[in-house]
Image (tube, rainbow, N blue to C red):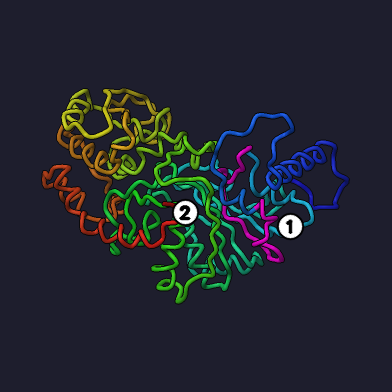
Amino acid sequence: MAHAPGAHSPSPRGTTRRRALATAAAAVLSPAPPAGAAPRPPRVRTGFERLAASGYAALTGLRVGVVTNATGVTADLHHIVDVMRAAGGGRVDIRAVFGPEHGFRGTAQAGGAEGTRRDPATNLPVHDIYGKRGRELAALFARAEVDTLVFDIQDVGARCYTYVWTLYDCMVAAALAGRAVLVLDRPNPVSGRGVFGPVTARAQASGVGREPVALAHGMTVAELALLFNGHFVPAAAGRAVALETVRAEGWRRADFFDATGLPWVPPSPNMPTPDTALVYAGTCLFEGTNLSEGRGTTRPFELLGAEGIDRRWADAANALELPGVRFREAYAVPVFSKFQGRTIGGVQLHVHDRRAYDPVRTGIALLVTAKRVWSGFAWRPDGWIDRLTGTTAVRTMIDAGASADEITAAWEADLAAFSARRAEYLLYR
């Protein structure tokens, strides 16, 4: 663990590290390439890079808490907490870091966190806020003596991914505690081309969907923050939170992650690539079943299966001729999670036209066909599928033998209402 500033003379290694971070901070503030160098290719500038380029003007004189994880990095892969700490002239007074599910450094598996501790790299207190909300979280912000919470986490574009609800919980708690929130935007990696899937019903509200939002929402975190503050935070906290956003520069709604020029840092241990994010909004639904969603394999959420499934599932799925995707008969031995150490059979998704691909319709079609071809199919007994979909209708309609088209038609009215509300808060056209 690092010592408090001034406790000991800095080691040569520590001095070198501080110089490197100071250089990184200067590069963010003055990003001109060296003389004679080829111009950088076009790329997106994140909200953090735009904040840094302003000399952190929005944070002047404030005590700052940072809600972030391993994805909170600059384009040259320096963590934003390190860069802000190294910024000259004491531009940013960081008092604490707050870690979501999987933790600040991103080491914990699904449903886990890294705990509260002092970060050895920065000597800052790191508070575990996964699962904390309301007045408990507001009291933590007060004890940490922060005026403003800075949120910078890469989302994956799916409502059941918990980081957007960490943002929501922080906004509610900040409103209760009289604190402000600054959201630094990043691109939606699966584009913002449209919305798909059911909208959370109030009766199914949970940590994977606290408010009525579509399963694939087609928004960035800053856009979601504006939506939350416009419709949901006042009802939960009695008032809106003092909110500012810094949008990303250069991102277009039709852009997928590979068009941004930004580095991909896995937002969680089982989200290794942007391809994983592309399918996640549909295949995450398999967490609500007794089939493996691919955790413990090299292709989580792209490879699905269970003991006793054979090529009939891939054949049945391909027969539907779903747009933009094909299915390969696949086998694997998960090294952890469901079916650990046992051979499973199933399908691997291969998306060949991502603009035509509908992740949620695909996920529903896979649930329907899995139940049809495998007699061992079962829902998780805790009703998790209803939390993931945000409704009881998907489960009950599949059990009743409905087709994927009948199921997706059932949420069209709710999806249209969400789409109209969403349109008020879009920052990128």
C-beta proximity under 8 Å, tags 1 and 2: no
Asked if the stretch drawn in magenta spans residue 72, the answer is yes
Comparing 208 with 327, the one in front is 327
On the image, the x and y values in percent for residue 122 come to 71, 48
> What quarter of the picture does the N terminus occupy?
top right
Taking the spot 52% from the left edge, 73% from the top edge, the residue there is 176
Taking the spot 46% from the left edge, 60% from the top edge, the residue there is 225
Q: Quick one: SS at disc 2?
A: helix
Residue identifier under label 1: 91
**Residue that sits furthest to the right in the current view:** 9
Q: Residue 163, which numbered label? A: none
Magenta residues (range): 52-76
Asked if the stretch drawn in magenta spans residue 118, the answer is no
In the displayed structure, does residue 295 sit left or right of residue 27? left
On the image, the x and y values in percent for residue 160 come to 37, 50
Amino acid carrying label 2: it is: Val
Q: How crowded is mark 1: few (under 14 residues within 10 Å), some or many (20 or more)?
A: some
Amino acid carrying label 1: it is: Arg
Label count reads 2
In the displayed structure, does residue 210 sit left or right of residue 268? left
**Residue 241 visible in the shown view:** yes
On the image, the x and y values in percent for residue 242 come to 54, 70
| Residue 278 in which image quadrant | top left
Q: How far apart are marks 1 and 2 (CA)?
A: 25 Å
**Residue that sits furthest to the left in the current view:** 401
Vertical comparison of 315 with 382: above or below: above
Residue identifier under label 2: 221
Comparing 58 with 267, the one in front is 58
Whichever of callouts 1 and 2 sits on the residue coming sooner in the sequence is 1
Vertical comparison of 211 with 178: above or below: above
Taking the spot 74% from the left edge, 45% from the top edge, the residue there is 26
Comparing 353 with 120, the one in front is 353
